Amino acid sequence: MNRLALAALAAVVGALALPSAAAAHGLVGRSDLPIPESLFAAAAATVLVISFLALATLWNSPKLERGPVRRLFRVPAWLDVACGAIGVALFAALVYAGFAGSQTPTDNILPTSVYVILWCLLVPVSALLGDVFRAFNPWRAVGRAVGWLIGRLSRSAPPEPLEYPDRLGRWPAVVGLLAFGWLELIATDGDKPSVLATLALVYAAVQLVAMSLYGVETWSRRGDTFGVYFGMFAQLSPLTTDDGHIALRRPLSGLTQIRWLPGTVVFVCAAIGVTAFDGGSEGDAFNSARVWMQDVFTGVGASAPTAFKLAMTLGLVASVALVAGFYRLGVLGMQSVDPRRQLGELSRRFAHSLVPIALAYVFAHYFSLVLYQGQAMSYLVSDPLGDGSDLFGTAGAGINYALVSASAIWYVQVAALVVGHVAGLVVAHDRALVDFGHTREAIRSQYWMLAVMVGFTSLGLWLLSEANK
């Protein structure tokens, strides 16, 4: 089995040399790279292998499980209320802008706020500072406020929420994540301000109904797509909350506290898959397959726009399935080390090592988008409706595309991928020490996780390359 594991590892490492150069997210052209492209791939593989050997040699006991938490300061009760109120006000203002402002996406503040600030920038912010979205979550704030009012005004105790079905797990959040990915990447009017505003109201209404049935906190942590998504990345942060206090913990240790309810593993795979599809769908390889699929759908009577959407939808689902299948192969390899272990349990136990990969994919793929399109907020806040107003005197600001060189972007993207996958190796190695002990089996089980990490790095580099075509 050792030889089989090493052979699989060698095959994946070899594949890493195949991807061509990565580039920014379609916003800036790539200049000549400072060193040959193959050296980036070789360096990435080398760093991962060296990290694996260092972990096997020097990391002899679990350090992330039940790590120490040190309280820093108490959070005033009013601050939570104030953050919620700010979140509600921002939500209302953005929805208003979506309906009342210009319907040109680049002139209205809503699309940039949703797709750049919320969906892209808030991911690394959450990984650094903790669950920021939870503090400002507008539907959570409204749900808590309504519950407080009912408790104050009702003469009898309000009814207890329904018991959340265990089998439902986080599947509602999975559905919401795929729906948002479809809206962002496939829908014809996905960036139209009035469409976004309408869907925002619909989503908020669904959240409030679900919270009234199952409880605000229960639904926020299980069914709310955005609450689950940003809460997942927040587990990477060294900052957390502990009984009303802001507390400090070891980085990555929060991942060991994730409750792996039904659907959670699929949710993490979907988070990677949606980003992977965004990159892959811009390249020649997918576009060739898409054209073929469109021809198949038009051949059975679908209109051209419908055929395009069906082909893209299949691509999105296939991307998520590819990520899930690749992780499944890694888990099967680990099970071969100790066949007594259940496949499903191993899958849940090591899935938290995918969260740093999800962060690496988001950061690498959307770095240039946030860097450049994020600058648009300087003039959008002054003219949020796109009607010529200048509230803060910055409506005439522009986007500086010379802020960072294309080569620097390439370095950042590759570094993000490598660091994210090394972090995944660290998390998986620490969990292997818990489950297998500091034994030969623990090391052997991680051959497969190394193959998974190198494979995901290879895929990430190829996706960045495809995004530039």
Image (cartoon, grey):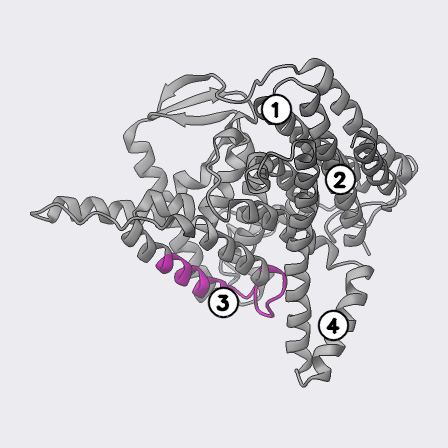
> Which numbered disc, 3 or 2, marks the residue that appears first in the sequence?
3
Residue depicted at 33% across the width and 35% down the height: 80
Residue 185 painted magenta? yes
- The furthest residue to the front: 340
258 or 465: nearer the viewer: 258
Question: In 3D space, how far apart are the residues under numbered discs 3 and 2 (Cα atoms)?
Answer: 36 Å
> Which numbered disc, 1 or 4, marks the residue that appears first in the sequence?
4
Q: Quadrant of the C terminus?
A: bottom right
Please report the bounds of the magenta region as a residue range: 184-206
Question: In 3D space, how far apart are the residues under numbered discs 2 and 1 (Cα atoms)?
Answer: 26 Å
Q: Is residue 173 visible?
A: yes
- What residue does disc 2 label? 457
Q: Are marks 1 and 3 in contact (CB under 8 Å)?
A: no
- What residue does disc 1 label? 436
* Secondary structure that dominates the magenta span: helix
In the image, what residue type sits under mark 3? Val
Residue depicted at 81% across the width and 66% down the height: 288
Give residue 145's position: percent from left, percent from top. Answer: 25, 46
Question: In 3D space, how far apart are the residues under numbered discs 4 and 2 (Cα atoms)?
Answer: 28 Å
> Which numbered disc, 2 or 1, marks the residue that appears first in the sequence?
1
Give residue 219's position: percent from left, percent from top. Answer: 37, 48
SS at circle 2: helix
Question: In 3D space, how far apart are the residues under numbered discs 1 and 4 (Cα atoms)?
Answer: 46 Å
In the image, what residue type sits under mark 4? Met
SS at circle 4: helix
Question: In 3D space, how far apart are the residues under numbered discs 1 and 3 (Cα atoms)?
Answer: 51 Å
